[in-house]
Amino acid sequence: MATLAEKILAYHSNKKDVRPGEFVNCKVDLVLSNDITAPLAINAFRKLGVNKVFDSSKIIMIPDHFCPNKDIKSAEQAKMMREFAKEKKIVYFEVGQKMGIEHVLLPEQGFVLPGQVIIGADSHTCTYGALGAFATGMGSTDIAVAMATGEIWMKVPTTIKFTYNGKLPRWIGGKDLILYTIGKIGIDGALYSAMEFTGDAINELPMSGRFTMSNMAIEAGGKAGLFHVDDKTKEYMAIHSGKNYSVFQSDEDAEYIKEIEFDISNLEPQVAFPHLPSNTKAVSQVGDIKLDQVVIGSCTNGRLDDLRVAAMLLKGKKVNPDLRCIIIPGTQNVYLEAMKEGLIEIFIEAGAAVSTPTCGPCLGGYMGVLAADERCLSTTNRNFVGRMGSPDSEVYLGSPAIGAASAIAGRICGPEEVI
Protein backbone atom coordinates (compact mmCIF):
# COMPACT_ATOMS: atom_id res chain seq x y z
CA MET A 1 0.00 0.00 0.00
CA ALA A 2 3.04 2.29 -0.07
CA THR A 3 4.05 4.86 -2.65
CA LEU A 4 7.54 5.24 -4.07
CA ALA A 5 8.32 8.16 -1.74
CA GLU A 6 7.07 6.29 1.32
CA LYS A 7 9.14 3.21 0.51
CA ILE A 8 12.37 5.18 0.14
CA LEU A 9 11.78 7.14 3.35
CA ALA A 10 10.83 4.00 5.30
CA TYR A 11 14.02 2.26 4.22
CA HIS A 12 16.17 5.23 5.22
CA SER A 13 14.36 5.52 8.55
CA ASN A 14 14.85 1.83 9.44
CA LYS A 15 11.10 1.33 9.50
CA LYS A 16 8.90 -1.31 7.90
CA ASP A 17 6.61 1.40 6.62
CA VAL A 18 5.79 5.08 7.09
CA ARG A 19 2.59 7.01 6.58
CA PRO A 20 1.93 10.57 5.39
CA GLY A 21 2.06 13.07 8.24
CA GLU A 22 4.42 10.89 10.30
CA PHE A 23 7.67 12.47 11.47
CA VAL A 24 10.79 10.40 10.84
CA ASN A 25 14.53 10.62 11.41
CA CYS A 26 16.01 9.77 8.07
CA LYS A 27 19.55 8.89 6.99
CA VAL A 28 20.79 10.80 3.95
CA ASP A 29 23.02 9.63 1.11
CA LEU A 30 24.06 13.02 -0.22
CA VAL A 31 24.18 16.56 1.17
CA LEU A 32 24.54 19.43 -1.29
CA SER A 33 25.14 23.17 -1.08
CA ASN A 34 26.30 25.94 -3.41
CA ASP A 35 28.08 29.28 -3.33
CA ILE A 36 24.98 31.09 -2.04
CA THR A 37 23.81 28.58 0.56
CA ALA A 38 27.05 26.90 1.69
CA PRO A 39 28.38 29.92 3.66
CA LEU A 40 25.18 29.95 5.74
CA ALA A 41 25.46 26.20 6.34
CA ILE A 42 29.15 26.51 7.23
CA ASN A 43 28.43 29.18 9.83
CA ALA A 44 25.66 27.03 11.31
CA PHE A 45 27.96 23.99 11.31
CA ARG A 46 30.62 25.91 13.27
CA LYS A 47 28.04 26.80 15.91
CA LEU A 48 27.25 23.12 16.47
CA GLY A 49 30.68 22.70 18.07
CA VAL A 50 31.60 19.57 16.09
CA ASN A 51 34.87 19.15 14.22
CA LYS A 52 34.10 16.40 11.72
CA VAL A 53 31.46 15.86 9.07
CA PHE A 54 29.64 12.53 9.15
CA ASP A 55 31.07 11.32 5.81
CA SER A 56 33.23 13.56 3.62
CA SER A 57 32.40 11.55 0.49
CA LYS A 58 28.68 12.27 0.86
CA ILE A 59 28.92 16.06 1.15
CA ILE A 60 29.29 18.13 -2.00
CA MET A 61 29.80 21.84 -2.49
CA ILE A 62 29.53 23.43 -5.94
CA PRO A 63 30.19 27.06 -6.91
CA ASP A 64 27.63 27.65 -9.65
CA HIS A 65 25.33 30.60 -8.96
CA PHE A 66 27.74 33.56 -9.09
CA CYS A 67 30.77 31.70 -10.42
CA PRO A 68 33.09 32.47 -12.06
CA ASN A 69 32.91 35.17 -9.40
CA LYS A 70 31.06 38.25 -10.56
CA ASP A 71 32.17 40.59 -7.76
CA ILE A 72 34.04 40.76 -4.45
CA LYS A 73 31.13 39.44 -2.37
CA SER A 74 30.66 36.36 -4.54
CA ALA A 75 34.42 35.78 -4.51
CA GLU A 76 34.42 35.83 -0.70
CA GLN A 77 31.54 33.35 -0.57
CA ALA A 78 33.29 30.98 -2.95
CA LYS A 79 36.54 31.33 -1.00
CA MET A 80 34.78 30.42 2.26
CA MET A 81 33.23 27.34 0.68
CA ARG A 82 36.49 26.30 -0.98
CA GLU A 83 38.47 26.56 2.28
CA PHE A 84 35.85 24.65 4.29
CA ALA A 85 35.75 21.89 1.67
CA LYS A 86 39.51 21.57 1.82
CA GLU A 87 39.53 21.58 5.63
CA LYS A 88 36.88 18.85 5.90
CA LYS A 89 38.08 16.96 2.81
CA ILE A 90 34.62 17.03 1.27
CA VAL A 91 33.80 16.89 -2.44
CA TYR A 92 34.30 20.24 -4.17
CA PHE A 93 34.07 21.15 -7.85
CA GLU A 94 36.29 24.06 -8.84
CA VAL A 95 35.36 26.35 -11.70
CA GLY A 96 36.53 24.87 -15.00
CA GLN A 97 37.34 21.44 -13.59
CA LYS A 98 34.49 19.11 -14.58
CA MET A 99 32.20 21.60 -12.90
CA GLY A 100 28.79 22.94 -13.81
CA ILE A 101 25.33 23.78 -12.56
CA GLU A 102 24.81 21.53 -9.54
CA HIS A 103 21.60 19.78 -10.64
CA VAL A 104 22.99 18.96 -14.06
CA LEU A 105 26.44 18.05 -12.75
CA LEU A 106 25.70 15.56 -9.97
CA PRO A 107 23.67 13.06 -12.05
CA GLU A 108 26.16 13.43 -14.90
CA GLN A 109 29.08 12.61 -12.59
CA GLY A 110 27.35 9.58 -11.09
CA PHE A 111 26.78 10.91 -7.58
CA VAL A 112 23.00 10.46 -7.71
CA LEU A 113 21.64 6.92 -7.49
CA PRO A 114 18.09 5.52 -7.57
CA GLY A 115 16.65 4.85 -4.13
CA GLN A 116 18.74 7.48 -2.36
CA VAL A 117 17.66 10.27 -0.04
CA ILE A 118 19.33 13.48 -1.12
CA ILE A 119 19.00 16.91 0.44
CA GLY A 120 20.37 20.19 -0.80
CA ALA A 121 20.37 23.80 0.28
CA ASP A 122 18.67 24.66 -2.98
CA SER A 123 14.98 24.30 -3.75
CA HIS A 124 15.59 22.58 -7.09
CA THR A 125 17.32 19.62 -5.45
CA CYS A 126 14.09 17.79 -6.33
CA THR A 127 15.63 17.37 -9.83
CA TYR A 128 17.16 14.03 -8.79
CA GLY A 129 13.74 12.42 -8.46
CA ALA A 130 14.06 11.76 -12.19
CA LEU A 131 16.36 8.88 -11.25
CA GLY A 132 13.98 7.41 -8.69
CA ALA A 133 15.59 9.11 -5.68
CA PHE A 134 13.81 11.07 -2.96
CA ALA A 135 15.45 14.47 -3.26
CA THR A 136 14.34 17.73 -1.68
CA GLY A 137 15.57 21.18 -0.77
CA MET A 138 16.13 22.26 2.83
CA GLY A 139 17.35 25.30 4.73
CA SER A 140 21.01 25.85 5.46
CA THR A 141 20.59 25.04 9.18
CA ASP A 142 19.15 21.63 8.32
CA ILE A 143 22.06 21.15 5.92
CA ALA A 144 24.54 21.95 8.70
CA VAL A 145 22.99 19.33 11.00
CA ALA A 146 22.98 16.78 8.18
CA MET A 147 26.67 17.46 7.49
CA ALA A 148 27.38 16.70 11.15
CA THR A 149 25.06 13.73 11.73
CA GLY A 150 24.12 12.26 8.36
CA GLU A 151 20.46 12.51 9.35
CA ILE A 152 17.48 14.80 8.95
CA TRP A 153 13.99 14.85 10.40
CA MET A 154 11.08 15.12 8.03
CA LYS A 155 7.33 14.87 7.86
CA VAL A 156 6.42 12.14 5.40
CA PRO A 157 4.63 13.80 2.49
CA THR A 158 1.44 12.71 0.84
CA THR A 159 1.78 11.61 -2.80
CA ILE A 160 -0.14 12.80 -5.85
CA LYS A 161 -0.04 10.52 -8.88
CA PHE A 162 0.09 12.24 -12.29
CA THR A 163 -0.61 10.07 -15.31
CA TYR A 164 0.11 11.40 -18.82
CA ASN A 165 -1.73 9.44 -21.50
CA GLY A 166 -1.09 9.61 -25.22
CA LYS A 167 1.90 9.86 -27.51
CA LEU A 168 4.21 12.85 -27.22
CA PRO A 169 3.52 15.28 -30.09
CA ARG A 170 6.45 16.76 -31.99
CA TRP A 171 8.28 19.50 -30.05
CA ILE A 172 6.64 18.50 -26.78
CA GLY A 173 9.08 17.71 -23.98
CA GLY A 174 9.35 17.69 -20.24
CA LYS A 175 9.17 21.48 -19.99
CA ASP A 176 5.83 21.56 -21.77
CA LEU A 177 4.41 18.75 -19.63
CA ILE A 178 5.41 20.33 -16.34
CA LEU A 179 4.30 23.85 -17.33
CA TYR A 180 0.96 22.43 -18.47
CA THR A 181 0.65 20.56 -15.17
CA ILE A 182 1.47 23.59 -13.03
CA GLY A 183 -0.94 25.64 -15.12
CA LYS A 184 -3.70 23.16 -14.28
CA ILE A 185 -3.05 22.67 -10.54
CA GLY A 186 -1.46 25.99 -9.57
CA ILE A 187 1.72 26.88 -7.68
CA ASP A 188 0.37 25.28 -4.50
CA GLY A 189 -1.42 22.38 -6.18
CA ALA A 190 1.06 19.84 -4.82
CA LEU A 191 1.92 21.61 -1.58
CA TYR A 192 4.18 19.38 0.55
CA SER A 193 3.35 16.37 -1.60
CA ALA A 194 5.55 14.05 -3.60
CA MET A 195 4.59 14.28 -7.27
CA GLU A 196 4.78 10.86 -8.91
CA PHE A 197 4.92 10.99 -12.72
CA THR A 198 3.62 8.02 -14.74
CA GLY A 199 1.91 7.10 -18.00
CA ASP A 200 2.63 6.25 -21.63
CA ALA A 201 3.98 9.71 -22.43
CA ILE A 202 6.33 9.51 -19.46
CA ASN A 203 7.64 6.14 -20.63
CA GLU A 204 8.46 7.83 -23.94
CA LEU A 205 10.14 10.84 -22.32
CA PRO A 206 13.98 10.88 -22.38
CA MET A 207 15.95 11.36 -19.18
CA SER A 208 16.60 15.03 -19.99
CA GLY A 209 12.85 15.69 -20.00
CA ARG A 210 12.39 13.78 -16.76
CA PHE A 211 15.05 15.90 -15.05
CA THR A 212 13.18 18.99 -16.24
CA MET A 213 9.89 17.79 -14.79
CA SER A 214 11.34 16.77 -11.42
CA ASN A 215 13.24 20.06 -11.30
CA MET A 216 10.03 22.07 -11.44
CA ALA A 217 8.02 20.01 -8.93
CA ILE A 218 8.86 22.73 -6.42
CA GLU A 219 7.09 25.25 -8.68
CA ALA A 220 3.86 23.42 -7.84
CA GLY A 221 4.75 23.41 -4.14
CA GLY A 222 5.91 19.78 -4.29
CA LYS A 223 8.25 18.26 -1.74
CA ALA A 224 9.70 15.98 -4.42
CA GLY A 225 9.06 14.92 -8.01
CA LEU A 226 9.64 11.23 -8.69
CA PHE A 227 9.86 8.85 -11.63
CA HIS A 228 10.00 5.08 -11.40
CA VAL A 229 13.19 3.39 -12.54
CA ASP A 230 12.79 1.88 -16.00
CA ASP A 231 15.07 0.81 -18.85
CA LYS A 232 15.89 4.42 -19.73
CA THR A 233 16.93 5.08 -16.14
CA LYS A 234 19.09 1.97 -16.10
CA GLU A 235 20.73 2.94 -19.40
CA TYR A 236 21.52 6.39 -17.97
CA MET A 237 23.00 4.88 -14.82
CA ALA A 238 25.11 2.42 -16.82
CA ILE A 239 26.70 5.36 -18.65
CA HIS A 240 27.13 7.71 -15.71
CA SER A 241 27.76 5.46 -12.70
CA GLY A 242 29.11 1.99 -12.10
CA LYS A 243 27.79 1.89 -8.54
CA ASN A 244 25.17 -0.48 -7.21
CA TYR A 245 21.79 0.99 -6.33
CA SER A 246 18.40 0.03 -4.95
CA VAL A 247 15.19 0.23 -6.92
CA PHE A 248 11.90 1.00 -5.18
CA GLN A 249 8.48 0.87 -6.85
CA SER A 250 5.05 1.98 -5.69
CA ASP A 251 2.70 -0.85 -4.78
CA GLU A 252 -0.21 -1.44 -7.15
CA ASP A 253 -2.59 -0.64 -4.29
CA ALA A 254 -0.59 2.36 -3.06
CA GLU A 255 -2.71 5.09 -1.48
CA TYR A 256 -2.49 8.49 -3.13
CA ILE A 257 -4.04 11.66 -1.77
CA LYS A 258 -5.07 12.43 -5.34
CA GLU A 259 -4.74 10.96 -8.84
CA ILE A 260 -4.73 13.28 -11.87
CA GLU A 261 -4.77 12.18 -15.51
CA PHE A 262 -3.94 14.20 -18.63
CA ASP A 263 -4.34 13.33 -22.30
CA ILE A 264 -1.44 15.10 -23.98
CA SER A 265 -1.93 13.72 -27.49
CA ASN A 266 -2.74 17.17 -28.87
CA LEU A 267 -0.76 19.30 -26.42
CA GLU A 268 0.87 22.42 -27.85
CA PRO A 269 4.18 23.87 -26.64
CA GLN A 270 3.54 25.83 -23.45
CA VAL A 271 4.58 29.32 -22.35
CA ALA A 272 4.33 30.65 -18.79
CA PHE A 273 3.51 34.35 -18.65
CA PRO A 274 4.66 36.77 -15.93
CA HIS A 275 4.80 36.52 -13.05
CA LEU A 276 4.04 32.89 -12.14
CA PRO A 277 4.99 29.48 -13.62
CA SER A 278 1.28 28.61 -13.40
CA ASN A 279 0.25 31.44 -15.73
CA THR A 280 0.52 29.22 -18.78
CA LYS A 281 -0.83 29.40 -22.32
CA ALA A 282 -0.49 27.28 -25.45
CA VAL A 283 1.93 28.93 -27.86
CA SER A 284 -0.87 29.53 -30.37
CA GLN A 285 -2.58 31.73 -27.76
CA VAL A 286 0.45 33.88 -26.93
CA GLY A 287 -0.13 36.75 -29.36
CA ASP A 288 2.50 39.25 -30.50
CA ILE A 289 5.02 39.57 -27.65
CA LYS A 290 8.31 41.07 -28.73
CA LEU A 291 11.44 40.13 -26.80
CA ASP A 292 14.70 41.75 -25.75
CA GLN A 293 16.41 38.56 -24.63
CA VAL A 294 16.30 34.77 -24.85
CA VAL A 295 18.12 32.53 -22.35
CA ILE A 296 18.61 28.82 -23.06
CA GLY A 297 20.21 26.86 -20.22
CA SER A 298 19.94 26.47 -16.41
CA CYS A 299 19.45 23.41 -14.19
CA THR A 300 16.07 23.02 -15.90
CA ASN A 301 17.11 22.96 -19.56
CA GLY A 302 20.90 23.12 -19.86
CA ARG A 303 21.53 19.52 -20.88
CA LEU A 304 22.94 18.28 -24.17
CA ASP A 305 19.51 17.25 -25.48
CA ASP A 306 18.27 20.79 -24.84
CA LEU A 307 21.16 22.31 -26.78
CA ARG A 308 20.60 19.87 -29.65
CA VAL A 309 17.00 21.03 -29.99
CA ALA A 310 18.08 24.68 -29.98
CA ALA A 311 20.82 24.02 -32.54
CA MET A 312 18.43 22.16 -34.84
CA LEU A 313 16.35 25.31 -35.12
CA LEU A 314 19.18 27.85 -35.17
CA LYS A 315 21.31 26.08 -37.77
CA GLY A 316 21.67 28.26 -40.85
CA LYS A 317 19.56 31.02 -39.31
CA LYS A 318 20.28 34.24 -37.44
CA VAL A 319 19.25 35.56 -34.06
CA ASN A 320 16.91 38.51 -34.56
CA PRO A 321 18.99 41.73 -34.45
CA ASP A 322 16.52 43.30 -32.00
CA LEU A 323 17.32 40.84 -29.22
CA ARG A 324 20.24 39.03 -27.58
CA CYS A 325 20.33 35.26 -27.20
CA ILE A 326 22.39 33.75 -24.37
CA ILE A 327 23.10 30.02 -24.31
CA ILE A 328 24.56 28.40 -21.19
CA PRO A 329 25.59 24.71 -21.22
CA GLY A 330 24.79 23.00 -17.91
CA THR A 331 28.26 21.58 -17.30
CA GLN A 332 31.77 21.63 -18.73
CA ASN A 333 31.09 18.17 -20.14
CA VAL A 334 27.90 19.34 -21.84
CA TYR A 335 29.89 22.29 -23.24
CA LEU A 336 32.62 19.95 -24.53
CA GLU A 337 30.17 17.52 -26.13
CA ALA A 338 28.31 20.42 -27.73
CA MET A 339 31.62 21.61 -29.19
CA LYS A 340 32.40 18.16 -30.57
CA GLU A 341 28.97 17.99 -32.21
CA GLY A 342 29.35 21.43 -33.74
CA LEU A 343 26.52 22.94 -31.71
CA ILE A 344 28.60 25.79 -30.29
CA GLU A 345 29.64 26.79 -33.80
CA ILE A 346 25.98 26.85 -34.85
CA PHE A 347 25.10 29.09 -31.92
CA ILE A 348 27.92 31.55 -32.51
CA GLU A 349 27.34 31.71 -36.26
CA ALA A 350 23.67 32.40 -35.53
CA GLY A 351 24.66 35.35 -33.35
CA ALA A 352 24.16 33.90 -29.90
CA ALA A 353 26.44 34.42 -26.90
CA VAL A 354 27.68 31.17 -25.31
CA SER A 355 28.71 31.16 -21.64
CA THR A 356 30.69 28.90 -19.38
CA PRO A 357 28.34 26.92 -17.06
CA THR A 358 26.61 29.11 -14.48
CA CYS A 359 23.17 29.71 -13.00
CA GLY A 360 23.84 33.38 -13.78
CA PRO A 361 20.75 35.05 -15.22
CA CYS A 362 18.23 32.57 -13.79
CA LEU A 363 18.25 34.33 -10.43
CA GLY A 364 19.24 37.75 -11.75
CA GLY A 365 22.86 37.15 -10.81
CA TYR A 366 24.77 38.10 -13.94
CA MET A 367 25.27 37.06 -17.59
CA GLY A 368 21.88 38.40 -18.65
CA VAL A 369 20.30 40.70 -16.05
CA LEU A 370 17.26 42.57 -17.38
CA ALA A 371 16.69 46.33 -17.39
CA ALA A 372 13.32 47.96 -16.71
CA ASP A 373 10.66 47.23 -19.35
CA GLU A 374 12.70 44.45 -20.97
CA ARG A 375 11.19 41.08 -21.80
CA CYS A 376 12.93 37.72 -21.75
CA LEU A 377 11.89 34.25 -22.84
CA SER A 378 13.84 31.83 -20.68
CA THR A 379 14.15 28.07 -20.32
CA THR A 380 14.68 28.54 -16.57
CA ASN A 381 12.18 27.60 -13.87
CA ARG A 382 10.87 30.81 -12.28
CA ASN A 383 9.47 34.06 -13.58
CA PHE A 384 8.63 35.92 -10.38
CA VAL A 385 8.71 39.72 -10.25
CA GLY A 386 12.35 40.83 -10.47
CA ARG A 387 13.64 37.27 -10.75
CA MET A 388 15.96 38.11 -13.63
CA GLY A 389 16.72 41.73 -12.82
CA SER A 390 14.56 44.84 -12.72
CA PRO A 391 11.17 44.45 -11.00
CA ASP A 392 9.80 46.25 -14.05
CA SER A 393 11.02 43.54 -16.44
CA GLU A 394 9.07 40.49 -17.60
CA VAL A 395 10.16 36.85 -17.80
CA TYR A 396 8.33 34.23 -19.85
CA LEU A 397 9.15 30.53 -19.49
CA GLY A 398 9.32 27.97 -22.27
CA SER A 399 11.23 25.04 -23.73
CA PRO A 400 14.51 25.21 -25.70
CA ALA A 401 12.43 24.81 -28.87
CA ILE A 402 10.34 27.85 -27.96
CA GLY A 403 13.50 29.71 -26.96
CA ALA A 404 15.37 29.09 -30.22
CA ALA A 405 12.34 29.83 -32.39
CA SER A 406 11.65 33.04 -30.47
CA ALA A 407 15.29 34.12 -30.79
CA ILE A 408 14.96 33.88 -34.57
CA ALA A 409 11.56 35.56 -34.80
CA GLY A 410 12.26 38.32 -32.25
CA ARG A 411 8.99 37.48 -30.52
CA ILE A 412 7.55 34.50 -28.71
CA CYS A 413 6.60 31.81 -31.21
CA GLY A 414 6.61 28.08 -31.73
CA PRO A 415 9.21 26.12 -33.71
CA GLU A 416 6.82 25.41 -36.57
CA GLU A 417 6.95 29.11 -37.51
CA VAL A 418 10.68 29.11 -38.22
CA ILE A 419 11.50 25.67 -39.64
Image (tube, rainbow, N blue to C red):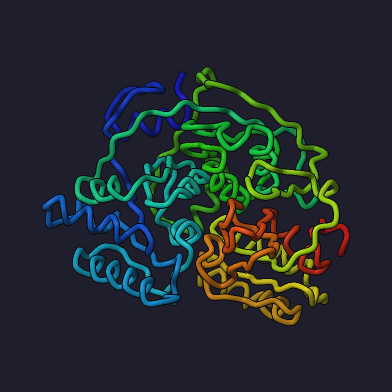
- Residue 335, image quadrant: bottom right
Residue 140 in picture, x, y percent from top left? 31, 50
Left or right of 8 on screen, residue 208 = right
Tally of marks: 0
62 or 305, which is in the foreground? 62
Q: For this rendering, which residue is in front, 140 or 355?
A: 140
- Residue at 37% across / 42% down in the picture? 117
Q: Residue 244: image x %, image y %? A: 38, 48
Question: From what the image shows, is residue 98 above or below residue 243?
Answer: below
Q: Horizontal placement of 216 versus 135: left or right? A: right
Position in image of residue 253 (x %, y %): 52, 17
- Out of 73 and 204, give the one closest to the viewer: 73
Report if residue 70 is visible in the image.
Answer: yes
Residue 352 placed where, x, y %?
70, 76
Q: Is residue 266 above or below residue 399?
A: above
Q: Is residue 203 visible?
A: no
Residue at left 54%, top 34%? 195
